[in-house]
Image (cartoon, helix red, strand yellow):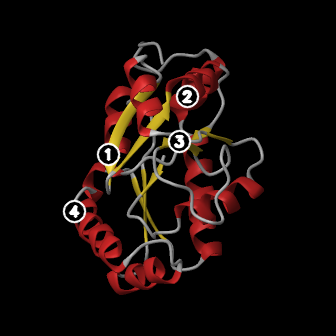
Amino acid sequence: MVSGPSGAGKDTVIESLRSYEPDLEYCVSVTTRPPRPYERDGIHYHFTTRDNFEKMAAAGEFIETREYAGNLYGTPRRTVEEALARGRDLILKPEVNGARAIKARYPGAVLVFLTPPSTAELERRLARRQADSPEAIEERLRIAREELAALADFDYRVVNDTLAGAVSDLRAILTAERLKVARLAGRMGLRHDTGNPV
């Protein structure tokens, strides 16, 4: 899972990562937030109404839901469970509290915290994308300061100073996780040296 403050560059980094890792599946989140000019439904998010989102949540269609800056976000259960059943690597992009909730439910999940190089750079990126009012930007910065306190709950931190560097770091994490003995043993039907099933 790649999480981090709004404006850290998650969409851009993930899109670039997937161009290098074509077998990496992506879980598109559902949101009630209106799309930004460059966003496409089903690619960046599944955009829906609050009423429909709440119906989906009541029907158990999400593994986690969160409200962020006045909008609802959810991770579709079916996408995650189908990928896991096929043994595929899956990347998710929940907000920080959502990532922690997913980790609690799926302890084997790997959490990556993506950050900009500084708070000043984060503020500059939020202003540059011209998607929010000054008040909304200030609210996102306030949330970002709170989210940074969650860093200790994550497995890795990647600084998005340059796109190439951030993608390279994420690819290194993927490689390291794929080579872990526990994951290899699970995929090969072997057992840990502890004698417990993987």
Q: In the image, what residue occupies the spot 47% across and 80% down?
A: 125
Residue labelled with disc 3? 29
Mark 2 or 1, which is nearer the eye?
1
Query: What residue does disc 2 label?
Result: 80
Q: In front: 134, or 146?
A: 134
- Say which label, 3 or 2, has the lower sequence index: 3
Residue, disc 4: 146
* Separation of residues labelled 4 and 2 (CA atoms): 27 Å
Please report the residue visible at 40 percent of the width from the left and 60 percent of the height from the top. Answer: 4
Q: Secondary structure at mark 3?
A: loop
Q: Residue 57: which quarter of the image?
A: top left
Which picture quadrant has residue 54?
top left
Residue 25 relative to residue 47: left or right: right
Measured along the vertical axis of the image, is residue 188 above or below residue 33? Answer: above
Dot 4 lies on which element?
helix
Q: CA distance from mark 2 to mark 1?
A: 20 Å
Separation of residues labelled 3 and 4 (CA atoms): 22 Å
Q: Nearer the viewer, mark 4 or mark 1?
A: 1
Amino acid type for the residue under numbered disc 2: Val
Residue 62, image x, y percentages? 44, 27
